[in-house]
């Protein structure tokens, strides 16, 4: 795993979302929403620069889901499921996309 800004954002967001599974003060959830929006927008921008439109759409959708202005009321249990799924997806993406990137680099070397 290469330490990049994107991987640090993904890891930090994953940790923050998993902490949401515990009983925390309401202010924590509000802070997580703000941090999540900023993190997902940054991730969407990085993917946009790579022309990876499907991931741009995913990160923008997640930014809208977590945005704190017009809160989406899913209930605690459903939010816990969303938090776990998103956290696991972010952690998995760290390893999967790094592997794909390596394969593209290796393929490029052998085709030249």
Image (cartoon, rainbow, N blue to C red):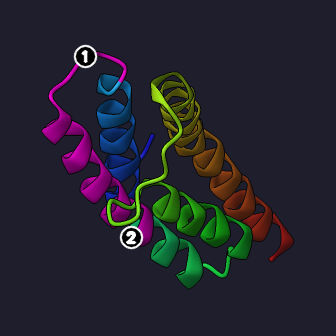
Residues in magenta, as a range:
21-41
Q: Residue reaching furthest right?
A: 111
The majority secondary structure of the magenta stretch comes to helix
Mark 2 lies on residue: 42
Residue 58 location, x and y as percent? 64, 61
Compared across the picture, whether 77 is left or right of 40 comes to right
> Can residue 39 be found in the magenta stretch?
yes
Query: Which one is in front, 22 or 1?
Result: 22
Q: Is residue 93 visible?
A: yes
Quadrant in which residue 25 is drawn = top left
Question: Which mark identifies residue 23?
Answer: 1
Query: Which one is in front, 34 or 99?
Result: 34
Disc 1 or 2, which lies upstream in sequence? 1
Q: Is residue 3 visible?
A: no
Question: Image point 76% across, 70% down: which residue?
Answer: 108
Question: Image point 53% across, 57% down: which residue?
Answer: 62
Residue 8 location, x and y as percent? 32, 48
Question: Image point 26% across, 58% down: which residue?
Answer: 34
With respect to residue 94, does 22 lie above or below?
A: above
The local crowd at label 1, few if under 14, some if 14 to 19, many if 20 or more residues have their Cα within 10 Å, is few
Question: Image point 52% across, 43% down: which residue?
Answer: 94
């Amino acid at each position: 795993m290469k330490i990049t800004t994107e991987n640090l954002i993904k890891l930090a967001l994953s940790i923050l979302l998993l902490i949401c599974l515990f009983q925390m003060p309401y202010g924590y959830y509000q802070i997580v929403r703000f941090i999540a929006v900023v993190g997902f927008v940054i991730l969407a921008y990085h993917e946009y620069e790579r022309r990876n439109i499907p991931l741009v759409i995913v990160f923008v959708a997640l930014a809208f889901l977590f945005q704190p202005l017009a809160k989406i009321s899913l209930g605690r249990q459903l939010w816990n499921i969303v938090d776990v799924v998103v956290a696991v997806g972010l952690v998995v993406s760290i390893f999967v996309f790094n592997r794909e990137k390596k394969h593209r680099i290796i393929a490029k070397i052998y085709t030249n």
